[in-house]
Image (tube, rainbow, N blue to C red):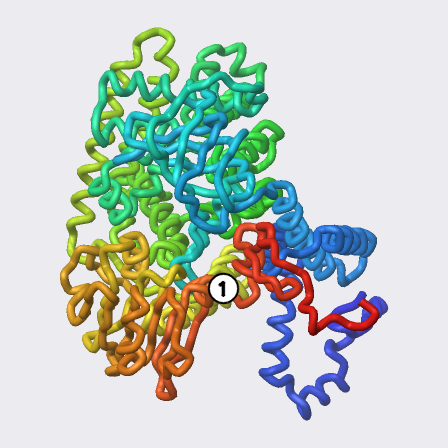
Amino acid sequence: MTDGGWEQKRPRAGKAIAWPPRETEATSAVFPLSPWRSFLETISGWMRAEAGPGRLLPWIPIAFGAGIAVYFTAAREPVAAVVVPVAAGACVVAFLARRHALFPILALFAAMLAGFATATLKTVRVAHPVLLAPVGMATLEGFVETHEERERTDRFVLRITKIDARGAPHLERVRLSVRKGTAPAVGQYVALKARLLPPLRPLRPGGYDFARDMYFQGLGASGFVLGAIKLTDAPQQGGLMLRYWTAVQGMRDSVDARIRTVLSGDERAIATALLTGRRDAISAPVNDALFVSGLGHVLSISGYHMAVVAGVVFFAIRALLALSVTLNTRCPIKKWAAAAALVAATFYLLLSGAEVATQRAFAMTALVLIAVMVDRRAITFRTLALAAMLVLLIAPEALVHPSFQMSFAATLALVMLAQNGLPGWFTDNDGALGRFAAWGGRELFVLAAASFVAGLATTPYAAFHFHRIAPYGVIANLVAMPVVSVLVMPAGLLGIVAIPFGLDSLFWHLMDVGIDWMIAVSQWVAALPGAFGRVHAFGVGSLLVISAGIVVLGLLRTPLRWTGAALIGGGIFLAAQATPPDVLIARDAASVAVRGKDGQLRIMPAAKNAFVAREWLAADADARVTTDPSLTQGVSCDATGCVVEGKGGDLVALAHRPEALTDDCARAKIIVTSHAIPSDCPARIFDRDSLRQLGGMALVRTDDGYRMIAGEPQGLDRPWAPAVAVEISGLRRRAGQAATPVDATPAEADRQADD
């Protein structure tokens, strides 16, 4: 038998053998075991335990997602014909080495390459043209695929069959806004005129890439309708998917129409959002209150909604079947209830529009229900890992979306809570805690703990993407969510079931009561001092460190897991050290923000592009609105341009007309303009062409001048962000468009004798 590397022999009967041997005792006395060696052996033991059987699977989607993340950081589009075979080869090598000691490393590396290849293939599959420059008027014909209501305007997606737009490629789909109440129905064939705009690129360095989202949604441009929309006969059939979307939209419209007969205003909009996923009609004050209070997650159909729908159906069906003694004793009613819940979750997925966030929630719920049907433990890290892999295989672009990050961070925290269990404070039924547990204290404690850990896990992502946190989110969720879970959602489900029987009005009234309570709680919490926690924008590196800490803290089981807490602390420290920019320049050279001597931004001009200004203020943790007079304090403007003094005393100028450049070059340190610059101008110039290539600019003042941070890496050329201009054979042309014909006849003096 082996123990610690020493060979033991069975002693003979009646003869005692001392252990350890005398020579070992002597050696230990002379050379005692060092604390450092003992520490290393302990760490090694923990690492072996973490690498034990069954511990690799949760890390596969982590590596897979890392490969997707690497794909989205590339400046140029990878070549699928090279990437896919390399990834396939790595997977084969890992499979062949499955009994080798290096298998875990090879498997994770292969998963990373597979994620990279999956994202590459998805981009190839959805490839479509993207508009590069605004089009003042385009004549379009096509099918209406989706329709959504918003507070002020409506919006729809048009699948184009015919387009007449000078300088624009043949776009496949565009998203258009219309006056409220004038959007055509899904499935109709329409002809219209519209102004088209390119997909919105990041508004600041490190900002969210809206163009990437639109690309993977199949949208090549956005815009708004000009004039009337004409309904015409379609020259061809719309196809199977259009019939599907028409049927789904019909169901959603029917549900909304029945809700309208009883509810109105925000109550109606929230009820529709909970049941159909259409949440854009909620008024701005109520929407803001919900998000400030930490209840905004209720508006987006996610794992919570799927869990409530599946849970209500599961327990209702199981309770009904249990009324029969025969069924209860002889049949697997639990599995039957899980199957019914899966059908209900599938219907809810279709009714809500099957968006990516809803697909992710459905995948997790379906795996849990299937685990119940096959007698496996439902809530485990393995289930979460399989759900993550399924979502990333279908939609790898979801990885960089805030809803995916927040949803899985929250789910990971909840699974960790379920795996580790809760303190045994409610096990003594004789004492006061026991009586409190019998009254419902255990459920309240579980709800509070779940709300706390889920909110804590999603806080870094809310801070990164939305520059805000909800300090009182636990309070709002603890007070409002029981009502939503017990009253609002079950009433909504029963209302849908009762629609064919004409008995749905009662259930909409019940939803109204619960929604009024939720709105009241959100407004009360939002009015508390310090309820809106604003956060300065920080880099993606800090978020990656925090994410790594959350994963380590959640997946590891030995004391090594506490290195995750150290990583989270390090990421928070890095985020706190982020330096806010002193100058922000928009990509179109039309807006500039300059930090004044009081540390606040001045925007030139503040009212021209309110959307950009709001993003800049939010990223600066600035509570001011775009109409605040202080935004233009110290800004001097006339018809030719604007100028303002920065915190270091440097003048920054925004030149609207060429005649302003003479004075600006003499006085300003930085000039932003869309016009040609005099060659002898000593100022630092940012013109429209350079800004389009760099994706906007942020400047940080240093002792030596300004440190420049480009919005996009130099040479960026991705399908959703084509290079603005390229040089080919001396001809400057826009990417994706035909070059302007140029006379190629060589000059007579340049011709050679053999020409």
Q: Amino acid at mark 1?
A: Gln
Instruction: Indicate the position of residue 521 as horizontal and vertical percent values.
Output: 20, 40
Q: Is residue 420 visible?
A: no
Indicate whether 82 appears above or below 600: above
Q: Position of residue 459 (x, y in %)?
A: 37, 55
Residue pictured at 29% horizontal, 33% vertical: 281
On screen, residue 172 above or below 476: above
Instruction: Classify the position of the N terminus by image quarter.
Output: bottom right
Whether residue 602 is visible here, answered yes or no, is: yes
Q: Which residue is mark 1?
A: 693
Q: Quadrant of residue 170?
A: top right
Q: Quarter of the image holding residue 98?
A: bottom right
For the C terminus, the image quarter is bottom right
Q: Would residue 683 appear left or right of 58 to someone viewing this image?
A: left
Residue 672 at x, y percent in the picture: 35, 69
Please determine whether, in this image, residue 24 is positioned above or below residue 308: below
Q: Tell me the residue at 46%/67% (across/down).
A: 690
List the single residue furthest toward the bottom: 30
* Picture mark count: 1
Instruction: Pick whichever, 331 or 725, lies toward us.
Output: 725
Q: Nearer the viewer, residue 328 or 699?
A: 699
